[in-house]
Each structure stands twice: as structure tokens, then as C-alpha cells.
Image (spheres, rainbow, N blue to C red):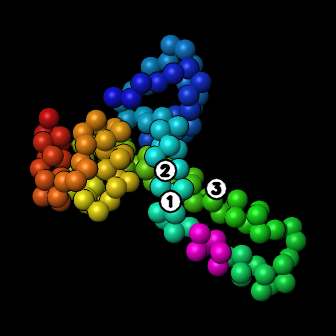
Amino acid sequence: MIKLKAGQRVIDEKGNRYIIEKGDILREGTVPYDVLDGILYKYEDKDYFEDDAIIKGKIEQWKSMGEPAPWTPSSIEDTMRDNFHNERVEWLQKVAQSIYDKDRKTLLSKVRYDQPLMQDLFLTVTGISLKGKSNKAIAEIIEDYVNS
């Protein structure tokens, strides 16, 4: 599983955030916040979620309203990116929890050959790589994981 260090931030299945202290032991089902951040930033940097177009539209809407204070284009962008990121961390935590719980139905619906983000999360939590596998092969791997 995932090794933790003192000072590392984690988020539990209910969305509570903690900082690890020396000697802390986490129960299974808690994914380090830093790990989720790392996975998400990898995809957000590539604009995987197409945030740039949404933010551009919001800034254009703001300009059409006469550029009301206290907002600026950079504050709009920062606020939206933070909100998107925080929502995705919570969403990834729920999926990670379903991996820990071995929830077959959720895993089969979310982890597919065309979902590299879910494949990376599955690899991070379980250590099992799904890269380059077909949906059928992924379903078999998930069945084996759930039944283990």
C-alpha cells in the first residue's frame, strides 16, 4: 500500500483532512491527500478536464458584465481552478474508497480502458497496473481483485 511520512496531508473517506504525525497509523481506506493531488495535477496540467475553455468562457462573461469589482481575470481563474480541484479530490477519494471496499459495481463502471485517471488511481491504491488492457481484461483483473 501507500507509505506515509510525518507532515504528509491525508484525506479520509468522509473528506476530513489530516496531517500525519510521527507514529500515526492510518486505517485502510485513507489515501494521502498529496497522492491525490499528484495524480490530479498530472491531468490538470494537460487540461484533461478541459478547464481552460470553461474558465475562458467565465472570464468573457465577466467582461460582458462590465468587469465588476472585486474580480479580476486572474482571481476568477484561481478561484475556479481551486474549486474544480477540490471537487475532484473529493470525487477521487470516493473512488479510492470504493477500491478499498472492493465495490465491484462501482469499479467496473469507473475503471475502463479509456479512463487513464482511474487506471492511475487504481495502480496507486492497489499496485496493479491496468495500462494497455482492454475493458474485458480490466474487468477480469477487477474481479480477481474483488474476490481476493
Mark seen at residue 38: none
Q: How many marks?
A: 3
Callout 2: helix, strand or loop? helix
Tag 3 or tag 2, which sits nearer the N-term?
Answer: 2
- SS assignment at label 1: loop
* SS at badge 3: helix
For the record, the magenta segment spans: 52-57
- The x and y percentages for residue 83 are 62, 58
Q: Position of residue 89 (x, y in %)?
A: 50, 49
Question: Residue at position x 59%, y 73% from top?
Answer: 54
Going by the picture, which residue comes out furthest to the right?
69
Q: Residue at x 77, y 62 (%)?
A: 75
| Chain-order first, disc 3 or disc 1 | 1
* Extreme-top residue of the structure: 23
Task: Please name the amino acid that badge 2 sits on.
Answer: Lys
Task: Name the residue that disc number 1 marks.
Answer: 46
Residue contact between numbered discs 1 and 2, judged by CB atoms under 8 Å: yes
Q: Residues within 10 Å of mark 3 (few under 14, many from 20)?
A: few
Residue 85 spot, x, y in % from top left: 56, 55
Residue 87, visible in the rendered structure: no
Looking at the picture, how far across and down is residue 92, in whole percent?
43, 50
| Res 71 seen here | yes
Quarter of image, res 106: bottom left
Residue position marked by numbered label 3 in the rendering: 82
